[in-house]
């Protein structure tokens, strides 16, 4: 299926190297007439050549189905967003009318009192939000200086479909949101953050202001002086994680898939000479289905452990209810986000 990580990650052409570009013509199903031309790539024409070649090659039936599915998804998403926007607009209009009717039904003195009280509540709310945001920024700044290093490895983007990539971007957004709410946040790194995943992340409002590290280079390069401290979290590891060492850097594979690429993170870590470990979920509960968690769920378990130093409590607060065969266990009965587009980790 796949030989090694280097082969999989080699998804760009080398510059100034002759490449064959195959162009297909006609609309005959299954059988195509084709013309092969040789071009010389350079920094100036590389992108143009690849774009022209891609445009000249007709899509397969499977590719067409995937594209149609993606287009339907985008259409439904836009419709849902439009409906939510309209609903909020109607709700705001209804509240405004109710407020005006209430003011009209009372005397002038009471009207002034209600108006002043409303101003006071708004001011207090804004002050509270500002204070909370300031404290959050302080915690995240402290985490960047002294927090536990957690890396989300984004070097698997070329193995994912557009829908899977979109799901991964959403999971990264959840990770940042969860981290900001924690009393003991971690120092989060995004490595291999370039290309399409970077483009989609930049579309998130405020992403440029996130207090995390956004590295285009790999974690091996980002931590080249600390390679002995790198630990890749993978379900295939025989090493069970008992404690989080402040000096170590824990890596989570940002791969949204649970069938096609089994064992890929373990193989990658072995080829790079990096230690591996797995979360001790199996020691505290049995999963009713596959041991599959989203990237943000793995991050949240680690964040909960940083606060509680208790793996059982951390797992029970995050693991989705449907994955637990026994809902009467000692842990808190808390439902969590359960996304089918997941990363495999024990």
Image (spheres, rainbow, N blue to C red):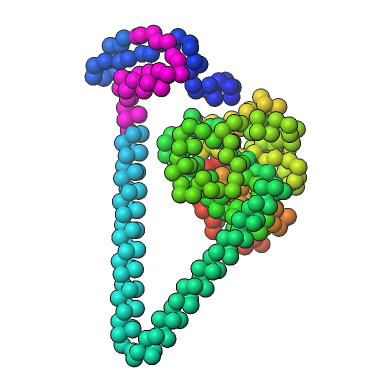
In this view, the residue in front, 264 or 113, is: 113
Is 28 part of what is drawn in magenta?
no
Task: Please check the rendered image and state whether residue 56 is part of the magenta-colored stretch, yes or no.
Answer: yes
Q: Is residue 139 visible?
A: yes
In terms of image quadrants, where is residue 51? Answer: top left
| Residue name at image x 54 percent, y 24 percent | 8
Q: Position of residue 79 (x, y in %)?
A: 30, 51
Q: How far across and down, in percent of the image, does residue 104 sit?
A: 30, 85
Rendered-image quadrant of the C terminus: top right
Stretch in magenta:
36-65
Query: So how many labels did they put on this image?
Result: 0
Q: Residue at x 42, y 36 (%)?
A: 162
Residue displayed at 51% across by 53% down: 337
Q: Going by the image, does 292 lie left or right of 241?
A: left
Relative to residue 72, is residue 16 depicted above or below? above
Can residue 276 be seen in the rendering of this structure? Answer: no
Residue 37, percent from left and from top: 35, 9
Q: Is residue 10 above or below residue 295?
A: above
* Identity of the residue furthest to the left in this view: 27
């Amino acid at each position: 299926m796949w030989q090694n990580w280097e082969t999989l990650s080699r998804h760009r052409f080398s510059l100034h190297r002759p490449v064959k570009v195959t162009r297909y013509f006609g609309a005959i199903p299954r059988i195509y007439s084709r013309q092969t031309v040789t071009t010389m790539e350079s920094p100036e024409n590389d992108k143009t050549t690849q774009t022209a070649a891609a445009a000249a090659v007709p899509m397969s039936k499977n590719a067409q189905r995937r594209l149609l599915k993606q287009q339907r998804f985008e259409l439904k998403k836009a419709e849902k967003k439009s409906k939510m926007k309209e609903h909020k607009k109607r709700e705001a209009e209804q509240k405004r009318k109710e407020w005006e009717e209430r003011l009209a039904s009372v005397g002038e003195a009471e009207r002034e009192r209600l108006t002043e009280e409303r101003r006071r509540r708004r001011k207090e709310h804004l002050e509270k939000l500002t204070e909370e945001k300031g404290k959050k920024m302080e915690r995240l700044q402290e985490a960047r200086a002294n927090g536990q290093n957690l890396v989300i490895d984004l070097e698997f983007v070329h193995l994912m479909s557009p829908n899977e990539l979109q799901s991964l971007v959403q999971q990264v957004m959840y990770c940042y949101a969860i981290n900001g709410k924690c009393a003991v946040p971690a120092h989060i790194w995004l490595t291999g953050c370039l290309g399409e995943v970077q483009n989609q992340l930049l579309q998130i409002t405020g992403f440029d202001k996130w207090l995390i590290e956004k590295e285009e280079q790999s974690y091996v390069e980002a931590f080249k002086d600390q390679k002995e401290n790198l630990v890749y979290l993978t379900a295939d590891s025989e090493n069970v994680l008992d404690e989080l060492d402040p000096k170590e850097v824990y890596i989570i594979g940002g791969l949204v898939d649970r069938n096609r690429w089994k064992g890929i993170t373990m193989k990658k870590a072995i080829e790079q000479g990096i230690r591996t470990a797995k979360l001790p979920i199996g020691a505290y509960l049995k999963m009713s289905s596959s041991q599959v968690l989203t990237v943000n769920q793995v991050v949240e378990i680690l964040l909960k452990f940083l606060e509680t130093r208790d793996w059982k409590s951390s797992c029970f607060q995050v693991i989705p209810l449907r994955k637990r065969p026994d809902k009467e266990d000692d842990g808190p009965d808390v439902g969590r986000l359960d996304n089918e587009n997941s990363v495999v980790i024990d």
